Image (spheres, rainbow, N blue to C red):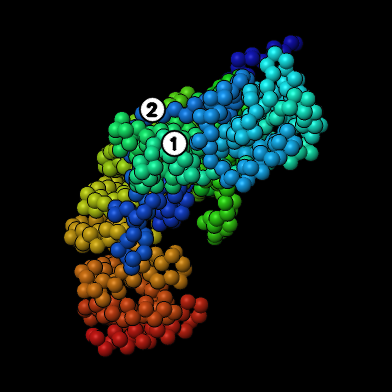
Amino acid sequence: MTTEAPDSESTEHADNAETTKNTEHAENKEEEQDRPQDAWSARRDLVDHSPKSMHVGANSRFGGSLVAGDQHGVSGGLVAGDVIMGGKTEIYHFGVSAAGGHGSGEVPPATLDRLAPYFVAEESVFEGLVTRLRTERVVVLSGPHFTGRRTAALMLLHRLGVSPVRTLVRDTTPEQLVQQLSDDKHPARGYVLCDLTTRRDQPLREPHLLAARDQLSKDDGYLVITVGPTAALEDISPVRWKPPSPGDVLTAHLRVLTDEATAHRLLTLPAVAEFLGRDHQLREVAEFAKTLKRYADGEVDEAAVRNFSLFSLENQVQEWFEEDEEQVPLRDKAFLVALAAFDGGPYALTAELSDLLYAFLQGTENSAVRPRVPVFGTHIGKRLQLARAERFKEEESTEWGPVIQSKAAFRDDRVSLVLLREVWTGHPSARPALVHWLQRLADDGRPLVRTRAASTVAVLAYTDLPSTMALVIEPWATSRLFRRRLVAVNALTLAHLLDAPNIPRILDAWCESDDEGMCWVAIRAYGLIGAERPEQTLAALRNAIRKQYERPGHDGDSNRDGDGDGDGVDDLMVKQLAQSVELLLLSPAGDQVLTELLRTLDDDRAVHDLALSGFLSACRRRKDDERHGQPLVLDWYATSAADGGRAAGGIARLWRAALDDRRHTRDALEELTAWIHTADRDPEAERALARLLPSLAGTAAEHQRLSHLLRTMRGEDSPPPPDVAARLLTTLSARH
């Protein structure tokens, strides 16, 4: 009897089916463990972890709050139009990148003479370098790119008066150095070797310099070598080149290009102060001086001066991504994108996730090759130098409390916005990898990572809303996983803070959608940005709650204390609607929201429950989210009562309605008990309650309920009632 070998195609189908089954099982298990984060905690994570570029000032729509002067709305409000969209006017060019090196050839004496008046350096330090070069014949200058190293090298030779001066190609190896200096076909007395190429297995060693010095002595020559801060050197102490300040360089250039009076006038322009306050390279300063000269001559208008800083930044970003693999490797490009997403975040986290993006980008470039990520070898200083970024220590909020982290940020806070726009719109081939990366970030267990995924997508949405909605936001919104939906909420919220178009229109449509994911996202987002148009927002929430109550089997009572465990989707939606009302009540538009809730309080059962559930949820929130902090609504009441505001009466009316409604009485009594416990520790809370409680006892039944609560309540940790209960009971009885 023979046994046939299994058909390969059948085996493949079986393997695929098994893989699909395992994937579905994993997704189902993941979905079972996925629960929606409550709106208040999610808002706190959004505020704590969104980038600083989205927290510029206190925008009137989102910053601050009317609740005791504390900030309970989503902060932010960056006017980013000029930064993100930019003019994209390609009129400034800064020559060949220094990373590209300089070709071999003679530098004409006229060029050196022309450069000399523009050169700025501390004279005593520079003269010491001239003396050292005259004595040792070889000097190695070390410093970052675009700090004037090459100009300094040429000026050292110019100050010595040597001629001719020849530049050597940057890929001259240390072993070839002497050979280049003894080239009879191109004799010279001065040599400059900029950005010498060194490797760990081919460092520049002291014997190389000694041999060069011997050769130079024969011809009475001099050599200046420039290297980067991370160059491989052995037994050599380079001279650290300290660049002049941009202000000094700009002043020197203007004095050469114009007269003294004109230079002084130009230096006092507000746009000049703004430019010098940014992180600009000396090559950009030199070009800015030329633009100022053209402005003084009437060739360009003030806008050209004002926009020069942004245009130069755009050119830098374009240069990063247009450079070939040798100058800016793909891994460095991935790091630049990750730093734009995690600007100001922990460096280790940024580097970790940049390597994830690097792997995805490799897959885009060559899907047949397994992505490889080097484990070691990347120098932090070199990475940050390329990115024009800095490292610093700062406190970071975590779920375990604040901790000190080593962070990294661009020195210019506009870079992240410009860079993300450039990658998304200027390099569409990177989109598949970027979208895959963002999807992975949205599934990350760390709130910071998920929030930065949202903030990154917000910038992309501002730049290109249709593509971003289709490729990223809509798939998140329609996902079965709440954490992905929440990232969609935050992305839409932050996009609206950036003034991306049509976000309220999208939310209005989604709130009416039959897709439960889109509807959920819209309701959550309403709680974050609805304060700018409270009447329209509450109308949409009322319509949504009515739809839930109209569902078959809804008894109008499941929203009381359901946490979603075992409840239907409608019950989760009802709870979410209440949380959105909670956020709106504690927003800068709290007074307006309160008025609107009272106006429609008795319209129908669904709207009544929405108002009371949202109100009681707001009553649970404490100042600074501290367990024993002052209740925000009680603080709001006290402030309003002291100022004669209408909010105090509205808060009292909602309390009475909640206490009188059998569906909400228990929750109301529990929260009132918590307020009384707070009053036992806080005299201000006690004074506020002493004023509030009598207004809640308008009838005999209401007075009896409150009296019974004060007489029978237990302490927080023991049966005896708190001392404050007796005092409040006396006050209640005296005023009834």
Amino acid type, residue under disc 2 in the picture: Ile
SS for dot 2: loop
Is residue 364 toward the left or the right of residue 520 in the image?
right
Residue in the image at 75% along x and 11% along y: 1
Residue 74 is situated, as x and y percent measured from the top left of the image, at 37, 53
- Residue 110 in view, yes or no: yes
492 or 726: nearer the viewer: 492
Indicate whether 652 appears above or below 268.
Answer: below
Q: Which residue is mark 1?
A: 256
Residue in the image at 21% along x and 74% along y: 644
Quick one: which residue is furthest to the front in this view?
161
309 or 445: nearer the viewer: 309
Quarter of the image where one finds residue 83: top left
* Total numbered circles: 2
304 or 600: nearer the viewer: 304
Residue 708 is situated, as x and y percent measured from the top left of the image, at 34, 81
Tell which circle, 2 or 1, labels the residue nearer the N-terminal end.
2
> What whole-number distance in Å separates the C-alpha atoms at marks 2 and 1?
23 Å
The tag on residue 91 is: 2
Residue 210 is situated, as x and y percent measured from the top left of the image, at 80, 32
Is residue 507 toward the left or the right of residue 368 in the image?
left
SS for dot 1: helix
63 or 508: nearer the viewer: 63
Amino acid type, residue under disc 1 in the picture: Val
